[in-house]
Image: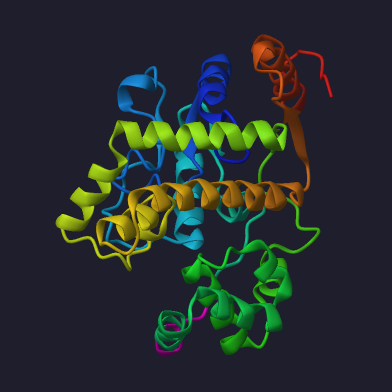
Amino acid sequence: MLVGPTAVGKTALSLQLARAFDCEIISGDSMQVYRRMDIGTAKLPLSEREGIPHHLIDILEPDEPFSASMFQQLCTEKIQEIHSRGKMPFIVGGTGLYVESVCYGYNFQGDTGDEAFRERMAAYAEEHGAELLHARLAVVDPATADRLHPNDIRRVIRALEVWETTGKTLSETQAQSRGDDKASPYRLCLLGLTMDRAELYRRINRRVDAMLADGLVEEVRQLLESGVPRSAVSMQGLGYKEVAACLRGETDYDTAVEWLKRDTRHFAKRQLSWFRHMKDLVWIDMDDAENNADHFRSICAIIAGKFSLGLEYIP
């Protein structure tokens, strides 16, 4: 598995590693499952996948829901399929809960739902603002509030819903689902990419500029005009909610771009925080962009060592 914050360089490296170890890639991204959402999700075009099979990409329409439990089920099935072909499954992505749920077999069977409560909280956020909704979560579940941005209204509401319906915090229920010492059902090699925070933020800003130049605004416009509601899970993704606000006249273009860059930087920080708590993760520092060959050799040695492929392990 290869994880790390957005814009750190996972995609390019994943292709190199997939070729080296005869892998099929499974996307560990909560947004790349949606069709017609290509630019804002940084989806690798089919023509650039070098013939390497990629799974769990373009499997849903943008108005369909998706969740960690759905990902876990689909990913588990794909792992079995890939193994049956004699290939190595290779999960690549940045959605921490999703990929960790597969690695350690989270139990989602106890998930509960209260649609009326979610509607009340959505109305509260609409009337009083996202910050006050987030403040309510901070009172009952400060740990979850700390890792959720106030603008991530859907997940803030979900965390409040868990507290309301179970009397337990989301962080507590997640810990119970996975079990702190629960062994993985798989033989894992977990790799995490990181780099200097300032350089990562520069890369994020450049990526946002490139997405806008490639037509992100038009992509969002077409989704809205096709009838995809702004309340859809997919439209809460980075890039989509900010551009939609601009297209609906709620803010100007420059402010929307500023929000998008800011929110993406905050998202990357939360990704790093999540991954730092994953056990068994081996970190690879990607600061020296000119040293890609050395990075690749080191990573290959780590993978070979984990799977007893005859190469020396380099920590």
Residue 9 coordinates in the image, percent (x, y)? 57, 28
Instruction: Check the picture and name the quadrant holding the C terminus.
Output: top right
Instruction: Check the picture and name the quadrant holding the N terminus.
Output: top right
- Asked if the stretch drawn in magenta spans residue 168, the answer is no
Q: Residue at x 81, y 58 (%)?
A: 181
Q: Nearer the viewer, residue 65 or 73?
A: 65
Q: Residue at x 22, y 50 (%)?
A: 221
Q: Is residue 33 left or right of residue 206?
A: left
Q: Is residue 309 left or right of residue 10?
A: right
Q: Is residue 227 left or right of residue 255?
A: left
Q: Residue at x 64, y 73 (%)?
A: 170
Q: Is residue 7 visible?
A: no
Residue extent of the magenta highlight = 111-118
Q: Is residue 200 above or below residue 252?
A: above
Q: Is residue 23 above or below residue 201?
A: above
Q: Nearer the viewer, residue 13 or 254?
A: 254
Q: Is residue 44 above or below residue 311?
A: below
